[in-house]
Amino acid sequence: METRKLGGLTVSDICLGTMTFGKDTPPAEALALMDRALDAGISFWDTAEMYPVNPAAAETYGRTEEIIGEWLASRGRRDEVRIATKASGPNGGHTRGGKGFEPGNIAEAVDESLRRLGTDRIDLYQLHWPKRGSYAFRQNWTYDPSRASKARAQEHMEGILEALRDVVAAGKVREFGLSNETAWGTMSWLAAAERTGGPRVVSVQNEYGPLHRLYDTDMAEVGQKENVTLLAYSPLAAGLLTGKYAGGALPQGSRAGNERLRGGEGDLHGRVTPRGLAAAEAWGKMARGLGLDPVHAAIAFVRQRPFPAIPILGATRLAQLDHLIAGLDVRLNAEAMRAIDAFHRAHPLPF
């Protein structure tokens, strides 16, 4: 397994996503997934205080961190893994009573995550989304940047970083990252760190993969020039690129099927569109034409970007993780990269 540097951290260049642990993934299988990931060299794991999700709920808030804590306590291998977690916004009122993250409570949020994880340090602490709102999750079509003034946003950033400066000095957090952030936001956080002496941004966790390439523009240059690594979530477009939703299918136990059963729209948060389904089908046809597994090709694509990037692999079941692990040696040649360029021109922003 190759590694990357996130500030002072050395992490595997593949990250295990855990957002289903404690809901769609039962605790016993979650423990087995962490065992399998570490055995394969995937020693960098991402979670959040609001997990599990789909949907997030008050009764399961923090459960994923607790399950990771159970693994850490039972295996005794804390020094072998790097744990990333996130502070969330109000999120319907169940995230720490709807408090969100503010300069006056960010240290409390860190302490609560440490308690659930059963550890003395968080390797990478992230903000789940900007307080001023986000372009993520298909909000890019309607987001209004005027909802928060520049001065108010910068004041909030400085306050958070000043509080985190003390948390880092106490050894509770090692590095700081963002999530669902923009180019202006990332650069503003970097500038605020210079002003306050707070921790510098080392990563940004945004959606990225063959079907969602908004990061390729301004954010890619920020990442490359400022040494901010992309932690790419949903590289498989929440399962679209596996082919399991082809023809409008909703397999039993699948994420879209589960969302439909829970009363949601079953559209994978706006990803299941006619153009999205057509693009997923075209990706599969292209990859197979190159002699590649479509899933393995998508992960390899993210790993080979010209800016620092680490794909997050979200597996609900052991069989899914085994399939992902089987393709970690895949490298795309020049012919494959040209085919992917042509695919992207034919299917830009399909959802």
Image (cartoon, rainbow, N blue to C red):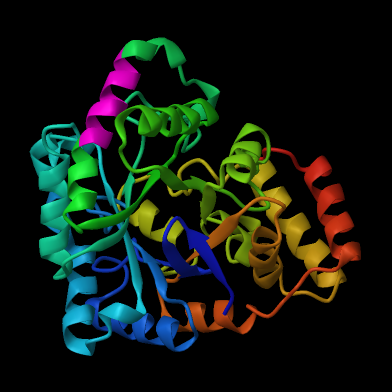
Q: Is residue 222 visible?
A: yes
User: Seen in the image, is 237 located left or right of residue 171?
Assistant: right
Residue sitting at x 13%, y 34%: 99
Residue sitting at x 54%, y 24%: 141
Quadrant occupied by the C terminus? top right
Image position of 159 with respect to 295: above or below:
above
The percent position of residue 321, horizontal first and vertical second, equals 49, 78
Number of on-image labels: 0
Q: Report the predominant secondary structure element of the magenta stretch.
A: helix
Q: Residue 302: say if magenta.
A: no
Image position of 264 with respect to 308: above or below:
above
- The part of the chain drawn in magenta is 152-162
The image quarter containing residue 20 is bottom left
Residue sitting at x 47%, y 33%: 186
Image position of 3 with respect to 228: above or below:
below
Residue sitting at x 44%, y 71%: 315
The image quarter containing residue 240 is bottom right
The percent position of residue 68, horizontal first and vertical second, equals 24, 72
The percent position of residue 133, horizontal first and vertical second, equals 37, 26
Q: Is residue 149 visible?
A: no
The percent position of residue 189, horizontal first and vertical second, equals 40, 32
Q: Residue 154: say if magenta.
A: yes
Query: Which of 55 and 234 lies nearest the eye of the viewer?
Result: 234
User: Seen in the image, is 135 located left or right of residue 74?
Assistant: right
User: Seen in the image, is 3 located left or right of residue 274?
Assistant: left
Image position of 332 with respect to 347: above or below:
below
Query: Which of 53 and 270 lies nearest the eye of the viewer?
Result: 53
Quadrant occupied by the N terminus? bottom right
